[in-house]
Image (cartoon, rainbow, N blue to C red):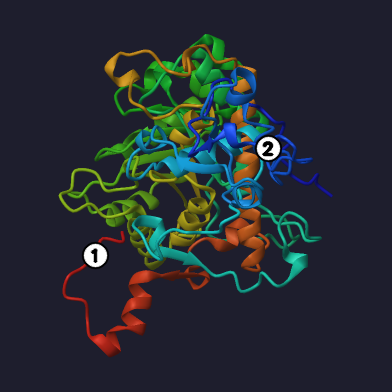
Amino acid sequence: MPKKYQIQTKAAPPKFYPVGKYATIEFREDCAGSCKECVKKNCVYDIFKDNYLHMSQMDEPEYLYACNSCFRCIQECTKGIFSRVVNPEYREIGDEYWTPDILGRTWYQAHTGSIPVSGAGYRGPFVGKGFDSMWTDMSEIVRPTRDGIHGREYINTCIELSRRPERLAFNEDGSLAIDIKPILEIPLPILFQHPDFGILSKNVLVSMLRAAQTLGTKMLINASDVYEDLMPFGPFIIPLVKKDNFQNYPKLLTHVEMVEIEYEPGIEKIFGALKAMNENLVISVGLELKADLDYAKTCVELSKTDIDTIHVYANSNGREFESDNPRFIKDMLRDIHLALIDAGKRQQLNIIASGGICMAEHVNKAIICGADGVTIDLPLLIAMECRLCDRCKNGLSCPVELEAIDPAYGSNRITNLMGAWRNQILEMLGAMGLREARRLRGEVGRSMWFEDLEKESFAPIFGERKISIDVG
């Protein structure tokens, strides 16, 4: 029996103080000083014990980077001198999509390898934009044996990157009558992507590759950025090439298992040349989702060629490129998935999605929409304490000195993040009654969409909405 896939995590405390959401205010002159057990010592999450900035420097106020909002400390202070406020610096990090809350939770997961919890529960809006207008069906959550982390049933998160045969044929003696290509699998429906901004030093790159090696996944990197020192990571690298430059990397392409080539019309003419360089090379085509491109039709045409995977790209916020009214990736994935089904090609080909994937739940939601797996880039930087402050874009120094990060520490933080994400993926799959990530692909019956619910529930009473709201 094959060994069960697990991600081993190890706590990696932050090197620089994280921007905490809350700060404490204490009127110490009123403190009795006679409490046998201060409310700080009784914190069920040990937040004050692990508050690295305050404990090391005794600065005031102290910033509660990992506070879970249970308010027990405030309620149980016998003198009523302890309170909490929102840290103004916290409001300034991130942006509308990559919110401060996402950054804070990513830091916590990269630090601990644990699923984040909230003592106050979910206090956000009922519906939001993008993936927040989509919910997953947890109707099987009452079955403890299906629990992904603690249950007895194994849930497989493996996906393929190589093309699957259309059908099997057998000889009279039972042997296969067709040639079966080697199967390329990864144990996690998540690949890494070289970010297109940020401090991308050698140490940062090696941190990402070491984490990919530990996890058994792969990382997409521009072929021009794969220098000699990175060649030992060859099996975990997917070089990005173009139609007019792939001939420049013959050595690299013989050391890797998969390559991605940027889409342009007539690209199918060079697939043979790529195979001539490495007959077992798995080929992916990178396709940007632009408003002026019929991407569903393009994917159908590509599926008829000798490729294995289509990698579709949205922008970092999950939106369509070059559009005045950009669609969100969940809707575009749905169009591509259904078009390939209609063409009878969906079972053979893989779809990998990039853009807007910033939480573990987005992985499962993207798969429900029709993807086989996703790639991530910014979460890798955030795991290494990046604050998305854009200082590097303006030629300014990095506040967390990312360029000098120790690769062992950086890869540890990324591995922790993926360990926490995988546990959340398993929890969701278990609650949906699924034992395999591949079974979730295109399974919209395991989801609920705000647009559909509104139309079914409220339209018969109030009529159709005249003014559309952006939930894509």
Q: Quadrant of residue 185?
A: top right
Q: Which mark is residue 32?
A: 2
Q: Position of residue 397 (x, y in %)?
A: 38, 13
Residue located beneath label 1 in the image: 469
Q: Position of residue 459 (x, y in %)?
A: 28, 84
> Counting other residues with Cα less than 10 Å from the Cα at mark 2, is it few (<14), some (14-19), or many (20 or more)?
few
Residue visible at 52% across and 37% down in the picture:
25
Residue visible at 65% across and 38% down in the picture:
47
Residue 217 seen anywhere in this rendered image of the structure: no
For the C terminus, give its image quadrant: bottom left
Q: Position of residue 78 (x, y in %)?
A: 66, 48
> Counting other residues with Cα less than 10 Å from the Cα at mark 1, is it few (<14), some (14-19), or many (20 or more)?
few
- Could you say whether the residue bearing mark 1 is in a helix, strand or loop? loop
Q: Which mark is residue 283?
A: none
Residue 423 seen anywhere in this rendered image of the structure: yes
Q: Is residue 134 above or below residue 83?
A: below
- Could you say whether the residue bearing mark 2 is in a helix, strand or loop? loop
In-front residue for pair 116/213: 116
